[in-house]
Amino acid sequence: MQFESVAIMLHDVVNRGLVQHHRLTLADVHMLAYLKAHGPSPMGAIAETLMVAPGALTQQARRLEQRRLVHRQASSDDGRRVMAMLTLDGARSLTAALKTYSGLVREHFLDELSRPQMIALGDSCRRISARLKGADPAPDAHRS
């Protein structure tokens, strides 16, 4: 439970810092970063990758669109699909938010670790991430 507690506290500290400094949640930063990395993308693909319910992503995109950080439009290939894209203001906001994000993670997490511990943590996270991406959660769901 200690890992979960630390993860939740770190998420909360980072999220509050992003909201305070940029009026962006950590989820907003994830969406903007996805769009920067992938370019214009179908909303469904974004929701699937970020593991967000489509309706929640639509609300988030609407809020970001009101701030002119994201633009949505019907796909030119299939008018039923909605595409989201990062605006210039969105890219600028993302750059600033990522600096804040990095500073908060460094201050509240990485500064507590030695260089060898950071390297070991990075290696462990890569292995765990690779395993989880291919995992079926059902078989081990009841393991204690």
Image (spheres, grey):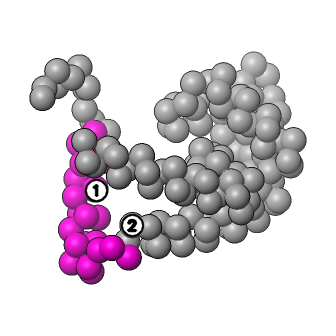
Give the vertical position of 59 relative to 123 (above or below): above
Q: Nearer the viewer, residue 61 or 85?
A: 61
Residue 109 has which mark? 2
At label 1, the amino acid type is Arg
> Residue sitting at 69 percent across and 68 percent down?
96
Query: Chief secondary structure of the magenta span?
Result: helix
Q: Is residue 5 magenta?
A: no
Give the vertical position of 131 relative to 42 (above or below): below
Q: Position of residue 21 (x, y in %)?
A: 71, 63
Q: Residues within 10 Å of mark 1 (few under 14, many from 20)?
A: few
Q: Quadrant of residue 110?
A: bottom left
> Residue sitting at 43 percent across and 51 percent down?
9
Give the vertical position of 59 relative to 21 (above or below): above
Q: Quadrant of the C terminus?
A: top left
The answer to whether residue 77 is visible is: no
Q: Earlier in the sequence, mark 2 or mark 1?
A: 2
Q: Is residue 108 left or right of residue 78?
A: left
Q: Residues within 10 Å of mark 2 (few under 14, many from 20)?
A: some
Q: Which residue is mark 1?
A: 126
Q: Quadrant of residue 131?
A: top left
Q: Is residue 79 left or right of residue 3?
A: right
> Residue sitting at 66 percent across and 63 percent down?
97
**In the image, which residues are magenta?**
111-132
Identify the element where label 2 is drawn.
Answer: loop
Q: Position of residue 102 (x, y in %)?
A: 53, 69
> Residue sitting at 87 percent across and 41 percent down?
66
Identify the element where label 1 is drawn.
Answer: helix
The answer to whether residue 99 is visible is: yes
Q: Quadrant of residue 72?
A: top right
Q: Position of residue 138 (x, y in %)?
A: 23, 20
Q: Residue furthest left?
A: 144
